[in-house]
Image (cartoon, coloured by chain):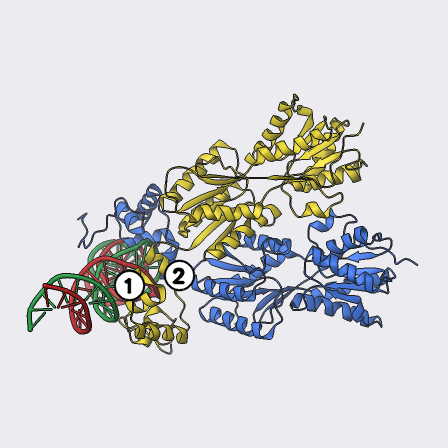
Chain colours: A yellow, B blue, C green, D red
DNA sequence: GGCAGGAGGGTAAGCGGTTTCCCGAATCGG
DNA sequence: CCGATTCGGGAAACCGCTTACCCTCCTGCC
């Protein structure tokens, strides 16, 4: 042991980290003054001379505040949590991009949590975000329709809010919280409407996991559009699949095996639509849109890369992220009333849809 | 003796947040004991009875520790920062996915920072991460080759390390830090080798921004591979482009305008390769790989969606993220020596390359 | 000239935990 | 049996920063 400074009352500040105390000492002012200068505390003015000295000292020592300490003293952080299923998924990546941009705009840091579609993990992350005293949490991605889960989720969110946190959902999570949600029903209706106008009457639907609210809403839109036109969605016209390319491919094969007479396929997201395209074109040898028309949902970048370019429903994903941040930042005046921002979607007609043959 | 020794201001603990103090009171033990039970402090044992009581109290009150307070007391957090250019870019999204998985494995929270390719912002985020007392920072994405910037970056990282933080780079940032880097040179060599074997002798290269180290290394690989075969990369055979689909498209058009005789194009990343494909096939009407072969780099998911599926160099992106985390978690024994993990890349031959015609 | 009032500066009490000491009791070797 | 440890628990000193409160001065106004 070289040196063991046991001086309890006077910790050896010389070699240690640069703290506000050191800055104050260096500038020859009290720590209170230093704090006021550097972090504009409590609306109190500081004389020009001292202010300059403090600033100089801080710069010279390269002072940087200790965020955890500030968080503790102020009982508030500048961290928001973003919970997604999977950052690798372009859908969430796009939302995250929006969130990041908004966060930068407002000097917030974003803590990312990826659940990989594990509901338990979602709860766990919520706990950890509460633990971090995150100022807010953004719950992104489709919720799970399981009532038991929604119950625990509501409880967790409740605790979070009780601790003073804000919550905003992206998409329907079955929870009473401020929400920004794309118009999934409307989008699906538009897609079906488009196909209908092209003369399609035998339309198959490749759906996603029925447990996801997003899937339910889109399917609801399909049903509504069809019923409005005097048709019901036949059970043999829908196949459930994983929300992935491979899922879409397999589901499409099954769909066409059951109903070879379909003239159009609507895949409830773009990933599956790309898979469907592969199935139709490569596996089944059906030309798109010549023999079968295809519509996707989300308007991910990949819709432009495939041939034919996919007709799809565009979701303003990046803006969704931004709007969710807005919800969190607006200190809501009328607490208690839940705010819901419905985002408009838009049908983007490209090359994968055409007139029904015959 | 249930009363507090000296009730100073006696903050109304009853209705307030659940603190360790409250748990201790509820369990009838000292706060020290409660801390030891709940956070296993300092390797000290606690009697079975008290332990049970504390645990019960914590559960009943739904106690959750205050991370900022712990961070302050322990002078260490469980937060790592991840700095990327753009989460929306599948390349970074994949890395982030790996990082998230590893983080979960080790109970770490990830603070995400997206610079949108603004060097200043990168520095700024480094500051904020230091400010947050992040335990480590992962610098992902290609570095900027600008010496002035590298200087500031090194300085910022130095401060971060001085504050006790760990640093790991993904890819070359021109900085003395632990690094995990894919073998960009080797990958490019493999790509060229593949084309060469197919008989291609007139190969064009669509490069990215020359300021990025990644681009430099890949280009270096190209040169090396060519020179080894007695050829030099002609100035008219390379065009610089934005690292995007549109950039690739425009660059390819220019490339083919200058050298219509090219039989193969190597795009230094997949995004540009997809653009190149569009340019070749749609704009120029050249069949791929019939007339022109095309190779990309990175092996993003979109390479599978396009037709023909892209031959490309596969980077283990997700694993890259995981390995970077590993670097950070291994408390390096021999400090001072820089660790470099070279990740192997692999040429994936698909349908966009074929024998040179004639 | 006297005094109320405001400005500017410092002191110190927390914020919620961790951890070092200090202490009494139980355990143990001789 | 007795002193030396060990064990388990509590008191209290911080961690770095914010902020309520107190205290001087300096003005402005009768």
The circle drawn on residue B346 is none
Report crowding for label 2: few under 14, some 14 to 19, many 20 or more residues within 10 A (C-alpha).
many
Residue linked to disc 2: A67
Relative side of B217 to B61, left or right: right
The answer to whether A246 is drawn above or below residue B347 in the figure is: above
Residue A31 x %, y %: 29, 69
Residue linked to disc 1: A44
Q: Residue at x 41, y 46 (%)?
A: A166
Please report whichever mark, 2 or 1, sits nearer to the chain's N-terminal start. 1
Residue C27 x %, y %: 29, 56
Residue A124 x %, y %: 46, 45
Residue B297 x %, y %: 72, 58
Residue B109 can be seen in this image:
no
The secondary structure type at the circle numbered 2 is: helix
The answer to whether A90 is drawn above or below residue A198 in the figure is: below
Chain to which mark 1 belongs: A
- The answer to whether marks 2 and 1 mark residues whose Cβ atoms lie closer than 8 Å is no
Q: Residue at x 47, y 71 (%)?
A: B159
């Amino acid at each position: 042991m070289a040196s063991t400074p046991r001086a309890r009352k006077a910790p050896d500040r010389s070699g240690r980290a640069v703290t506000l105390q050191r800055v104050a000492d260096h500038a020859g002012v009290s720590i209170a003054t230093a704090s006021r200068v550097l972090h504009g505390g409590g609306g109190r003015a500081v004389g020009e001379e001292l202010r300059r000295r403090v600033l100089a000292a801080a710069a010279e020592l390269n002072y940087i505040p200790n965020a955890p300490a500030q968080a503790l003293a102020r009982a508030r952080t500048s961290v928001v949590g973003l919970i997604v299923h999977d950052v690798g998924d372009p859908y969430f990546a796009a939302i995250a991009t929006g969130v990041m941009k908004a966060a930068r705009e407002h000097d917030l840091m974003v803590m990312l949590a990826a659940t990989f579609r594990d509901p338990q993990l979602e709860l766990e992350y919520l706990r950890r975000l509460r633990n971090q005293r995150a100022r807010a949490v953004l719950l992104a991605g489709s919720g799970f329709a399981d009532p038991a889960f929604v119950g625990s989720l509501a409880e967790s969110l409740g605790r979070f809010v009780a601790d003073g946190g804000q919550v905003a959902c992206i998409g329907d999570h079955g929870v009473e919280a401020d929400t920004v949600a794309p118009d999934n029903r409307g989008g699906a209706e538009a897609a079906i409407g488009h196909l209908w106008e092209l003369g399609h009457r035998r339309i198959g639907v490749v759906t996603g996991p029925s447990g996801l609210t997003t899937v339910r809403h889109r399917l609801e839109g399909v049903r509504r559009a069809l019923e409005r036109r005097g048709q019901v969605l036949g059970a043999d016209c829908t196949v459930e699949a994983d929300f992935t390319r491979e899922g879409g491919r397999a589901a499409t094969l099954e769909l066409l095996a059951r109903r070879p007479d379909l003239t159009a396929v609507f895949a409830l997201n773009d990933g599956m639509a790309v898979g469907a395209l592969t199935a139709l074109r490569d596996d089944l040898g059906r030309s798109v849109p010549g023999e079968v028309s295809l519509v996707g949902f989300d308007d991910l970048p990949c819709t432009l890369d495939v041939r034919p370019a996919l007709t799809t429903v565009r979701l303003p994903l990046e803006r969704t992220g931004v709007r969710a941040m807005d919800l969190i930042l607006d200190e809501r005046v009328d607490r208690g009333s839940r705010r819901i921002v419905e985002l408009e979607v838009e049908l983007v007609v490209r090359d994968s849809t055409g007139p029904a043959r015959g």
